[in-house]
Amino acid sequence: MADLDERAEAHLVAARGDERGRSAELLVRDGPLRQTVIALTAGSVLEEHNTPDAASIQVLRGRVRITGPQTIEMGAGDLQTLAHDRHGVLAIQDAVLLLTAVTGVGPTGGPERAR
């Protein structure tokens, strides 16, 4: 079992010491499910990238801006499903996120079928 508060603090400390201002750890890997804690210092960016088949972000600490076709600002306690568009993340304040992602799922939420 992962203690999210403990992992958040550890990764925030690590991000503050990192030249890119970030630190991350894959906490859960179970079949197609992935949960990753990501810490970013204020002003740090996760460049634009593709969204997994299904994903959400929960802000554990701080404030971030999700960029892409729509811009969404999120603070501690906010939970947002990510659209299936390219997006990036900007830390407005030092922040820690819990990214939950599921891969290998089709558009209806069931397993992806071979084509």
Image (tube, rainbow, N blue to C red):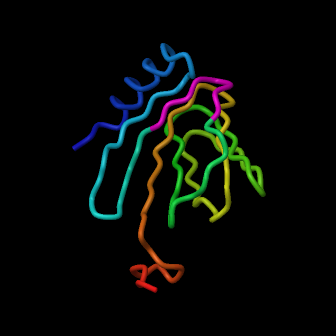
x, y percent for residue 46: 61, 37
For image coordinates 30% across by 50% down, the residue present is 28
Nearer to the camera, 20 or 28: 20
For image coordinates 52% across by 56% down, the residue present is 56
| 73 displayed left or right of 18 | right
Q: Quadrant of the N terminus?
A: top left
Q: Is residue 98 above or below residue 56?
A: above
Within the image, what quadrant is residue 95 found in? top right
| 41 displayed left or right of 30 | right
The magenta segment: 38-45
For image coordinates 62% across by 40% down, the residue present is 75
Within the image, what quadrant is residue 70 found in? bottom right
Nearer to the camera, 71 or 105: 105
Task: Please identify the residue farthest to the front as the structure is shown.
Answer: 115
* Membership of 11 in magenta stretch: no
Within the image, what quadrant is residue 92 found in? top right
User: Count the marks: how many?
Assistant: 0
x, y percent for residue 69: 78, 57
For image coordinates 28% across by 63% down, the residue present is 31
Task: Please identify the residue farthest to the left as the structure is shown.
Answer: 1
x, y percent for residue 99: 47, 49
Q: Is residue 28 above or below residue 2?
A: below
Task: Please identify the residue farthest to the top as the structure is shown.
Answer: 17
Nearer to the camera, 61 or 17: 17
Q: Is residue 109 above or below residue 61?
A: below
Q: Is residue 109 above or below residue 103?
A: below
x, y percent for residue 36: 40, 44
